[in-house]
Amino acid sequence: MANYPLKRLRRLRYNPLVRDMVRETILTKDDFIYPLFAVPGEKIKNPIKSMPGVFQMSIDVLVEECKEVASLGIPAVILFGIPEHKDEVGSDAYSPTGIIQQAVRAIKANVPNLLVITDVCLCEYTSHGHCGVLNGEDILNDETVSLLAKEAVSHAEAGADIIAPSDMMDGRIIAIRKALDYKGFTKIPIMSYAAKYASGFYGPFRDAAESTPAFGDRRSHQMDIANTNEAMREVESDIEEGADIVMVKPAGAYLDVIYRVKEKFGLPTAAYQVSGEFAMIKAAAQNNWIDGERVMMESLVAIKRAGADMILTYFAKDAAKYLDRTRK
Ligand code: PBG
């Protein structure tokens, strides 16, 4: 800096009130989407070992949880279902009496002031844990897309407010858009998992959703972790196909991708702080190796600073309470 000593950047840092005044990124509760896991049964609240504070819940418990989420001022939840029966083609995913369809109806009936987003994928519903219909070890794209469209329509029929396809098949956004519109659901937005990477950070989620593939992995459809130009192409095609909101996933290790997506397309952009990101912070905090609350907020502010307009995070409740307490 040539003009020191006249110029001193520390002037705006000495006083906390000044720091508040010049802060560039403000996290609010409106930014959060809270993921929840629905299981069949009653009065069930199974802790997920690798995700402290996160539970699989039966619908009665889930409804109470949603009341708490809404009362904390969090605007939205995203639902994942663990069905009673799994089969080769994930039938429960598009059954009118499937676990998600029941959960959506119950939440919409009891907690009307909460947005219900549904994750559309087959991996939680197939006996083999893959995201689509198989031919041998190959996931069939177009056959899977028809089932995903059916699943999306059945979520909308149950009352879902936003549909979020997470499967990464080609052409699923346009197929889902057309299917929704054909059934009259022209007002329901699609939040597409547009740039979803084949990430090791999903490990704890697969325990929670019981969706670990029986063989192989998801690299034939989820993106290579090394690529960002390809992410631009994925996002662009989802937008052309009719996505209203685009998502980058995971978040913390992909801030460059969030930044590029927001800069280039300017669409409402979501980022998913996934299970492994959450688990690592929780584990280090439990060991007193880091200040858990501080790192939680730092991780969320970083995701927003990179360009995310909304964050799917298992920290939503904790962060909302923190914001209430500190007012920042
Ligand atoms: C697929 C889906 C996954 C996650 C969200 N939707 C798992 C996967 O692709 O294997 C991961 C979320 C997380 O790790 O928190 N239905």
Image (spheres, grey):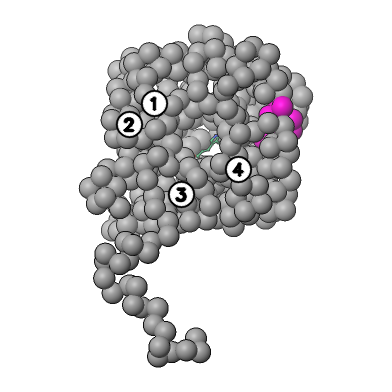
Q: Name the residue under label 2.
A: 69
Q: Height in image: 105 above or below 71?
A: above
Look at the numbered disc 1 and say if its residue's Cβ is closer than 8 Å to ligand 1: no
Q: Give the range drawn in magenta.
A: 168-174
Q: Secondary structure under badge 3?
A: helix
Q: How far apart are marks 2 and 4 (CA)?
A: 26 Å
Mark 2 burial class by Cα count in 10 Å: few <14, some 14-19, many 20+: many
Q: Mark 1 points at which residue?
A: 114
* Callout 1–callout 2 Cβ contact below 8 Å: yes
Whichever of callouts 2 and 3 sits on the residue coming sooner in the sequence is 2
Please give the name of the residue rendered at 25% of the width and 44% of the height, measured from the top-left corner: 324
| Disc 2, SS | helix
Mark 4 and mark 2 in contact (Cβ < 8 Å)? no
| In this view, the mark in front (1 or 3) | 1
The residue at the far left in this view is 325
Out of 103 and 181, give the one closest to the viewer.
Answer: 181
Horizontally, residue 198 falls left or right of residue 202, namely right
* Ligand 1 positioned in quadrant: top right
Residue underneath mark 4 = 267
Q: CB at mark 3 closer than 8 A to ligand 1? A: yes
